[in-house]
Amino acid sequence: MPGPKDLDPSSSPRALLGSELRHAREKAGLSQDELGLRLFVSGSFIGQLEAGTRRMQPEYARMLDEVLETGGFFLRNCKAAAKSKYEECFEDAAEAEAQATGIRQYAPLLIPGLLQTSAYARAVNRAYDPTTPEETVQGWTEGRMARTRLLDHPTKPLFWAVLDEAALRRETGGREVMAEALRHIADLGRRSRVIVQVLPLSSGAHAAMGGALKLMEFEDAPPLVYYEGARIGRLEDDPATVAQMRFVFDLLVASALSQEKSLALIGSLAQDYAHEEHP
């Protein structure tokens, strides 16, 4: 497994912790795989901790201190590195997303967060819990909009989304909100900032009937797949699982409309919403 490049310790507490972990591991003369065996995890998991794409949990910090004889350093500092503005079920995925060089996502029920507009995000967040105070919903929405700034860079990360047609036809926040949201996606696609394909309802059964998935690739860490449900989320780094989910995504791409036809459909639906012709 190739070693990671030097991290910038000043970039974040998580990057600092990862840099220190790599230093301590190398000082102990252990490879990532060898250290992983001591912690009953994979070598790729250790690589993700060192690259900062994984949040260090207290139980692993405690074991690292024991194996590497670091005098409690990792346990003392893992809490600072774990601080996040996102909900617990999503914080690891959001941190990994921010460092990914490539993101491939299938969204069956809603527009993916990176493609959302503020009004659409607010409607989704409000629907999650109708009794939540307005300031909390606003905080969630601002956090989601902060994530969309990843796409401000002209080329990185590569973002490839397969959107289920059902997500585009589910009226979320009202017709005006949907028209704006779909125009935003079409604009990103036409500016070649993202690759967007629509999986039409006419495609019938497909490889991802079980739900949403997100694949993330990194320059200096193994790839991850993220599964998401209602108030739950899980990152998986098992190479066989990641490879299988990449195959699933490839099957979805094969069943989806071309990018040109997808953007035409999205634009047509946006016009329908704007003129109240959406069935």
Image (cartoon, rainbow, N blue to C red):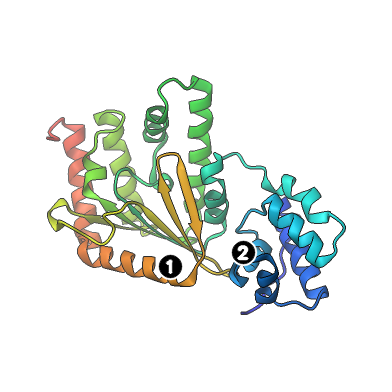
Closer to the camera, 69 or 154? 69
Looking at the picture, which amino acid does disc 1 mark? Thr
Residue at x 78%, y 51% (from the top left corner): 75
Q: Is disc 2 placed on a helix, strand or loop?
A: helix
Where residue 106 appears, x then y in whole percent? Answer: 34, 55
Residue that numbered label 1 is attached to: 241
Residue at x 78%, y 55% (from the top left corner): 74
Residue at x 55%, y 69% (from the top left corner): 222
Is 245 located above or below residue 266 in the figure?
below
Closer to the camera, 36 or 207? 36
Mark number for residue 174? none
Residue that numbered label 2 is attached to: 48
Where residue 105 appears, x then y in whole percent? Answer: 38, 56
Are there few (<14), some (14-19), or many (20+) residues within 10 Å of tag 1?
few
Where residue 190 appears, x then y in whole percent? Answer: 31, 55
In which quadrant will I find the C terminus? top left
Looking at the picture, which amino acid does disc 2 mark? Gln
The mark that comes first in sequence, 2 or 1, is 2
Side of 77 relative to 125 (left or right): right
Is 11 located above or below residue 121 in the figure?
below
Residue 88 appears in which quarter of the rendering? top right
Distance from Cα at disc 2 to Cα at disc 1:
16 Å
Q: Nearer the viewer, mark 2 or mark 1?
A: 1
Side of 43 relative to 102 (left or right): right
In which quadrant will I find the N terminus? bottom right
Residue 13 seen from this side: yes
Where residue 104 appears, x then y in whole percent? Answer: 40, 60
